[in-house]
Image (tube, rainbow, N blue to C red):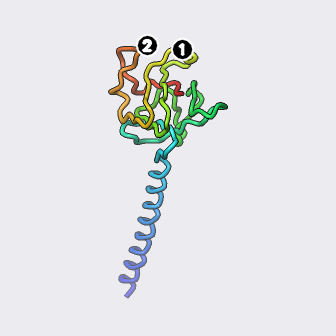
Amino acid sequence: MRTPRRIAVFLSALAVASASSAVVASSAQAAAACYAGELCVYQHSNYTGSVFKVPADSRGWLCDMDLRNNTFYNGEPMDNKASSIKNNTGKAVDLYLDPATNGIDIDYIISWQQSVPNMATVVPSGSFAGGNLDNQLSGIC
């Protein structure tokens, strides 16, 4: 009689553990969603890994010209680490590879409602022409 009871207790504990991990997984997926009006930068291609949602500046624009002091939601440094972007705003967004240019050198423009699933396929203009934007982003506005 003890063996069936132990099996029942074990199976109950296993069911609770499985349910808990499912809740954690869905919470992590929800945190990476990019909603209407948001500009989201993802750590990996195809909108995977952690995310950074670009905050509004003093003008109300989703803009950050120096990503060196920012982190993805998982705490990893963000500068030169982005591999995909979702622009769910109604405005075009300029991408910059060097914050030292103070917005003078626009390297790529993402139009409104455009997404870039793999920054390695994007060839920039300006002084960085010839490479790609994967793990190169330092400013976005």
In which image quadrant can residue 7 be found? bottom left
Kindly give the residue lying farthest to the right in the view shown. 58
Element under disc 1: loop
Q: Is mark 1 in CB contact (under 8 Å) with mark 2?
A: no
* The N terminus sits in image quarter: bottom left
Please give the name of the residue rendered at 49% of the width and 45% of the height, measured from the top-left corner. Answer: 36
Q: Position of residue 128 (x, y in %)?
A: 42, 14
Q: Which residue is mark 1?
A: 104
Residue 104 in picture, x, y percent from top left: 54, 14
Spatial distance from mark 1 to mark 2, Cα to Cα? Answer: 10 Å
Q: Nearer the viewer, residue 85 or 61?
A: 61
| Residue occupying image coordinates x 51% and y 18% | 98
Identify the residue at image location x=43%, y=35%.
85
Residue 126: mark in rendering: 2
Task: Decide which of 2, 124 is in the foreground and name it.
Answer: 124
Q: Is residue 140 left or right of residue 49?
A: right
Dot 2 lies on which element?
Answer: helix
At label 2, counting other C-alpha atoms closer than 10 Å, the crowd grade (few under 14, some 14-19, many 20 or more) is few
